[in-house]
Image: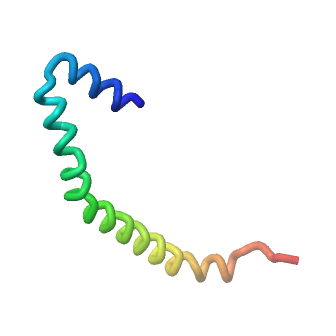
């Protein structure tokens, strides 16, 4: 909602820039999508490595479950 209100203010003050932003936003979003996917994959790899490294500590030092 805030982005929409800012865009409306930009439309009032400088309508060519607002229309250019409206056209370029989907193109920029699609161009940045691979970087988001790489970020998700790298985060998953780090989570997996952390789980592998901490697994022995969980097995040996974890609380007993009754």
* Residue 19 in the image, given as x and y percentages of width and height: 17, 33
Q: How is the image coloured?
A: rainbow
Q: Name above or below for residue 23 compared with residue 31.
A: above
Q: Tell me the quarter of the picture where residue 13 sits.
A: top left
Q: What residue appears at the point 24 percent right and 57 percent down from the top-left corner?
A: 30
Q: In this orientation, which residue lies closer to the viewer: 4 or 40?
A: 4
Q: Is residue 53 left or right of residue 19?
A: right
Q: Is residue 46 left or right of residue 8?
A: right
Q: Tell me the quarter of the picture where residue 12 sits.
A: top left
Q: Name above or below for residue 61 compared with residue 2.
A: below
**Residue farthest to the left?**
16
* Residue 63 in the image, given as x and y percentages of width and height: 77, 73
Q: Name above or below for residue 41 compared with residue 17.
A: below
Q: What residue appears at the point 21 percent right and 23 percent down from the top-left corner?
A: 11
Q: In this orientation, which residue lies closer to the viewer: 59 or 20?
A: 20
* Residue 17 in the image, given as x and y percentages of width and height: 13, 30
Q: In this orientation, which residue lies closer to the viewer: 13 or 50?
A: 13
**Residue farthest to the top?**
13
Q: Name above or below for residue 26 compared with residue 64.
A: above
Q: Tell me the quarter of the picture where residue 15 sits.
A: top left
Q: Is residue 50 left or right of residue 43?
A: right
Question: Considering the image in quadrants, where does the N terminus appear?
Answer: top left
Counting labels gives 0
Question: Considering the image in quadrants, where does the C terminus appear?
Answer: bottom right
* Residue 45 in the image, given as x and y percentages of width and height: 40, 74
**Residue farthest to the right?**
66
Q: What residue appears at the point 67 percent right and 82 percent down from the top-left corner?
A: 59
Q: Is residue 32 left or right of residue 55?
A: left
Q: What residue appears at the point 18 percent right and 43 percent down from the top-left corner?
A: 23
Q: In this orientation, which residue lies closer to the viewer: 14 or 57?
A: 14
């Amino acid at each position: 909602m805030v982005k929409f209100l800012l865009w409306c203010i930009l439309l009032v003050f400088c309508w060519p820039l607002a229309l250019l932003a409206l056209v370029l936003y989907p193109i920029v979003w699609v161009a940045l999508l691979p970087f988001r996917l790489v970020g998700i994959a790298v985060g998953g790899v780090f989570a997996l490595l952390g789980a592998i490294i901490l697994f022995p500590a969980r097995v040996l030092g974890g609380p007993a479950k009754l």
